[in-house]
Image (tube, rainbow, N blue to C red):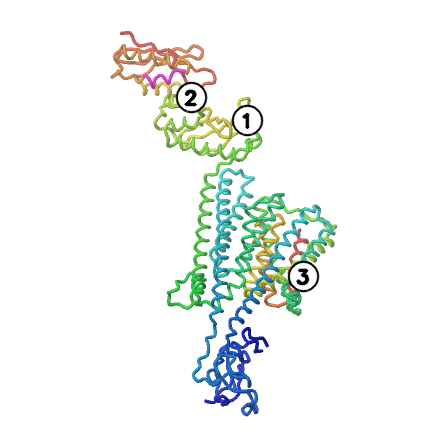
């Protein structure tokens, strides 16, 4: 092969000049892969422009010693053309993709932050929805939708950041700037939104070239790592990119469906248990946080009543109340026979609130599920927390109280609950003495049928049959009370 | 022609080896090409940043100015147009011409009218649904100021915003990503930049869809005119219905 053999030809794609052995055939361009065809006319005889490179057939200028395409000396034989992508190019691409990778990590971190904040806002909206009254439900649902949308956008950004870095970075930077501007319009500057916006904008420049670099150097280690493909996998870079894109969309679809299902089910659940706060609380000047705190205490009371012990209910009272009288509520419950099991209560909201000289008081009336009666609870705000102040049980008939008395016989500690509070301790001592004198402490004759006697004002005489004798008792119903109280118990004569 | 960094010989710009000394020119070419690409990327990001940040600043300044009189509106829209020009100029001397795009035929204008109707239908349906859910009521606009409102709410924003988003921002994004990604990014930024109007994320869904429609028009026709027509139709209908 000589340097001047062949005919002149040009690449149709990039215009590179070559010398080719035959004018009849088409050749592939070594630069761009396009078709190289012989020039028309008398170009075959034109040798004035120079010689052809023996290695790559490129045209050599007349004065050149080295080929401008492959670097081979034109006399040298068997010179190999250099590879199309130089080492420098690959190193620079790897460096830039490494920067893009770090930028994408920063973008994903910011998306994580916004996603977590949005999810917290979704939870907050659900908490609002639980206590919102009918007028507030619409705006709260709109707020819930907004927060869910933000969550979905954050999920999209997290999943697609590696496949579409530039759009994700620009969208994130714009959103972060919007947040900063909204905060600034309120007359405040917060460092966290400002920092997130700055980090987002700093990530835009490295990602601007990432897509092109990924396409051109998809066989690079960093590109494959960026796409989540293992470097040792026998898979082409372009295929890894396509696989990554498909996986990202699938993952996003699954996560979005899961999130929507979760929020939808949670909304339905909250809606079914919705217990609106009373507007009277806001009218009375109770802050929203305190209203929510009261709602939480009501939920604890509901749980303690239905599934807990009297001690759980006492725990809802203030420490100062329990120090002075921790037995009042257990006694009241024991008197009704409700010390172990109680008729279930329905969930309830707040009836009303008032501010009196002792502080803020709020009432709540619960309805029993199985009884046609109501339980009124009174709550007192001490500091920023709410405590159970008192319980008002549904009023009972004398027959009910007498039957409960008979079921408590002969345990003095339970019978003492039938005395009114001032007489309770003395009544208990008297009962213990009577039971001991009769030898009924271990085993006593059961109480038989009772017989209602005369009525004087609000006092009624009742006689119980016990061991073939008659035991006389006096019961009174004080004004404003919810039940009858034992005032006198005379044991049968020995 | 360029010079070999080793021997100073003049070589073709596309040569990979020096014809004088045989030294590798690829590294120098690769570094130069990378520098050029980085410069383009920086210009793109500068243009986008200018559009986004300066628009927020402009909207915030207008909100703080208090009552939106004709003079304030005019100043705001002129500010947007100037921003668009600045962002397009950052992209290079050919930026403004590229932002304007080519000419539009009557078919493209008709497509713009159809796009405007479609985006208005989506926006009106969305706004009605949100208002019904939240219990809010749209404030009726004063009927005696209709011509003025059509100019300040429909015509000026259509011209300024389209020049900004489907003009400067479009060209900036197009230099970095493909057509689909450009449509999505411009629509998203278009929607987000309306969030300062008081609706925050509430403004996002219907504005985003309107942005997609306008971006699609720009991509199909290659011109800014159909986008302006669509935006004008959308805003004018909103004013007339309100």
Distance from label 1 to label 2 (Cα)? 26 Å
Nearest the viewer among A177 and A93 is A93
Residue furthest to the top in view is: A493
Give the residue number, with chain letter if any, for mark 3: B85
Q: Is B126 placed above or below A438 here?
A: below
Left or right relative to A414: residue B147: right
Q: Are marks 3 and 1 in contact (CB under 8 Å)?
A: no
Q: Position of residue A283 (x, y in %)?
A: 58, 31
Left or right relative to A342: residue A42: right
Is A419 inside the magenta-drawn segment? yes
Asked if residue A313 can be seen in this view, the reply is yes
Q: Position of residue A253 (x, y in %)?
A: 45, 56
Which residues are the magenta region?
A412-420
Q: Position of residue A185 (x, y in %)?
A: 63, 46
Distance from label 3 to label 2 (Cα)? 77 Å
Helix, strand or loop status at disc 3? helix
Q: Chain of mark 2?
A: A
Q: Chain of mark 3?
A: B
Left or right relative to A300: residue A362: right
Q: Is A355 placed above or below B126 here?
A: above
Give the residue number, with chain letter if any, for mark 2: A323
Give the residue number, with chain letter if any, for mark 1: A354
Query: In the image, which is nearer the foreground, mark 3 or mark 2?
Result: 3
Nearest the viewer among B106 and A20 is A20
Query: In the image, which is nearer the foreground, mark 1 or mark 2?
Result: 2
Residue furthest to the front in view is: B7
Sequence-first disc among 1 and 2: 2
């Amino acid at each position: 092969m000589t340097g001047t053999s062949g005919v002149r030809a040009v690449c149709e794609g990039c215009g590179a000049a070559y010398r080719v052995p035959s004018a009849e055939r088409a050749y592939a361009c070594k630069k761009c892969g396009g078709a190289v065809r012989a020039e028309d006319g008398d170009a075959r005889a034109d040798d004035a422009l120079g010689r052809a490179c023996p290695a790559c057939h490129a045209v050599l200028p007349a004065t050149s010693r080295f080929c401008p395409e492959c670097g081979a000396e034109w006399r040298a034989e068997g010179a190999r053309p250099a590879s199309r992508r130089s080492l420098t190019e690959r190193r620079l691409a790897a460096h830039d993709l490494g920067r893009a990778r770090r930028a994408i990590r920063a973008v994903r971190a910011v998306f994580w932050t916004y996603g977590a904040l949005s999810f917290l806002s979704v939870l907050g909206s659900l908490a609002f929805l639980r206590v919102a009254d009918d007028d507030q439900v619409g705006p709260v649902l709109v707020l819930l939708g907004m927060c869910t949308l933000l969550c979905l956008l954050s999920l999209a950004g997290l999943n697609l950041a590696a496949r579409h870095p530039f759009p994700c970075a620009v969208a994130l930077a714009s959103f972060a700037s919007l947040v900063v501007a909204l905060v600034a319009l309120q007359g405040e500057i917060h460092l966290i939104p400002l920092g997130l916006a700055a980090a987002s904008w700093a990530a835009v420049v490295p990602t601007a070239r990432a897509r092109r670099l990924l396409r051109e150097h998809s066989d690079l280690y960093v590109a494959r790592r960026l796409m989540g493909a293992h470097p040792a996998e026998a898979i082409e870079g372009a295929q890894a990119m396509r696989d990554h894109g498909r996986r990202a969309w699938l993952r996003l679809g699954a996560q979005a469906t899961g999130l929507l299902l979760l929020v939808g089910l949670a909304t339905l659940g909250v809606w079914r248990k919705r217990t609106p706060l009373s507007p009277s609380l806001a009218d009375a000047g109770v802050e929203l946080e305190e209203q929510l705190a009261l709602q939480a205490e009501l939920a604890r009371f509901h749980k303690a009543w239905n599934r807990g012990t009297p001690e759980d209910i006492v725990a809802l009272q203030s420490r100062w109340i329990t120090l002075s009288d921790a037995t009042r509520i257990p006694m009241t419950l024991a008197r009704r026979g409700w010390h172990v099991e109680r008729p279930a209560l329905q969930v309830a909201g707040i009836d009303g609130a008032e501010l009196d000289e002792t502080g803020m008081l709020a009432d709540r009336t619960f309805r029993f599920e199985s009884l046609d009666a109501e339980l009124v609870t009174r709550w007192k705000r001490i500091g920023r927390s709410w405590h159970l102040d008192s319980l008002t049980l549904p009023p009972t008939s004398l027959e009910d109280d007498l039957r409960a008395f008979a079921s408590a016989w002969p345990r003095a500690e339970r019978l003492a609950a039938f005395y009114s509070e001032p007489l309770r301790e003395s009544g208990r001592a008297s009962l213990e003495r009577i039971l001991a004198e009769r030898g009924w402490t271990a085993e006593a004759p059961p109480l038989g049928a009772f017989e209602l006697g005369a009525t004087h004002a609000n006092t009624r005489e009742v006689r119980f049959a016990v061991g073939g004798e008659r035991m006389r008792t006096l019961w009174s119903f004080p004004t404003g009370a919810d039940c009858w109280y034992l005032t006198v118990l005379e044991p049968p004569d020995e | 022609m360029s010079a070999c960094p080793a021997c100073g010989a003049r070589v073709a710009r596309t040569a990979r080896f020096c014809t004088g000394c045989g030294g590798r020119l690829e590294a120098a070419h690769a570094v130069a090409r990378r520098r050029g690409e980085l410069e383009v990327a920086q210009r793109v990001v500068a243009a986008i940043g200018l559009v986004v940040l300066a628009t927020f600043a402009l909207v915030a300044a207008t909100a703080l100015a208090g009552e939106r009189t004709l003079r304030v509106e005019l100043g705001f829209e002129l500010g947007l147009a100037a921003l668009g020009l600045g962002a397009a100029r950052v992209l290079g001397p050919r930026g403004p011409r590229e932002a304007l795009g080519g000419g539009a035929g009557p078919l493209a204008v008709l497509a713009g009218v159809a796009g405007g109707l479609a985006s208005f239908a989506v926006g009106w349906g969305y706004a009605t649904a949100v208002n019904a859910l939240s219990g809010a009521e749209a404030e009726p606009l004063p009927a005696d100021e209709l011509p003025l409102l059509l100019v300040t709410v429909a015509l000026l924003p259509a011209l300024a915003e389209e020049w900004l988003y489907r003009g400067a921002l479009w060209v900036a994004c197009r230099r970095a990503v493909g057509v689909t990604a450009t449509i999505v990014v411009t629509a998203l930024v278009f929607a987000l930049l309306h969030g300062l109007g008081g609706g925050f994320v509430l403004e996002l869904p219907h504005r985003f869809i309107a942005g997609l429609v306008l971006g699609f028009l720009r991509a199909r026709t290659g011109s800014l005119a159909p986008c302006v027509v669509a935006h004008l139709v959308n805003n004018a209908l909103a004013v007339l219905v309100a």
